[in-house]
């Protein structure tokens, strides 16, 4: 059974997805070819590699600082946060999972 923090983060990810069509200049549907980090995000999900997730998080936050209007980057960042939660839940590390839940959300630029 997933914790309420995990449910909150999943709800946050759904919220980001629902905002994609509203973003100015962003296409309503983006293919994997349009998302250079999409493959890396998917690989990190499959491997549950925390170092890879940390690296992706840093890259995505840097991209957000450069282009805060790209809703796809926010979606990828929300996915990375969700994958962190999965890693922490598998390790039964409630403290790290809770910290991840509270640190999620759009990065400040």
Image: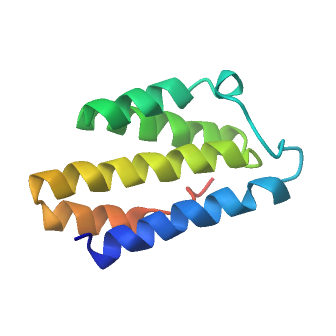
Is residue 100 or residue 40 the one in the foreground? 40
Q: Measured from the top left, where is residue 8 in percent x and y? A: 42, 73
Q: Please tell me which residue is depicted at 77% across the width and 48% down the height of the picture.
A: 69
Q: Quadrant of the N terminus?
A: bottom left
In the rendering, at what x and y percent does residue 47 appear? 27, 30
At 32% across and 78% down in the image, what residue appears?
A: 4
Percent position (x, y) of residue 46?
32, 32
In which quarter of the view is residue 38 placed?
Answer: top right
Coloring scheme used = rainbow
Count of marks, rendered view: 0
- Give the x, y percent position of residue 66: 69, 38
In the rendered structure, the answer to whether residue 48 lies left or right of residue 58 reads left
Q: Quadrant of residue 97?
A: bottom left
Which one is nearer the viewer's eye here, 24 or 45? Answer: 45
In the drawing, does residue 86 fall left or right of residue 80? left
Q: Residue pushed farthest right?
A: 25
């Amino acid at each position: 059974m997933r914790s309420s923090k995990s449910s909150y983060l999943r709800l946050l990810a759904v919220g980001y997805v629902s905002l994609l069509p509203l973003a100015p200049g962003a296409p309503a549907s983006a293919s994997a070819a349009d998302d250079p980090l999409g493959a890396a995000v998917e690989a990190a999900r499959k491997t549950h590699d925390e170092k890879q997730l940390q690296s992706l998080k840093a890259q995505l936050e840097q991209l957000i600082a450069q282009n805060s209007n790209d809703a796809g980057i926010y979606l990828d960042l929300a996915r990375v946060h969700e994958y962190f939660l999965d890693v922490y839940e598998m390790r039964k590390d409630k403290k790290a999972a809770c910290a991840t839940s509270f640190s999620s959300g759009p990065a400040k630029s």
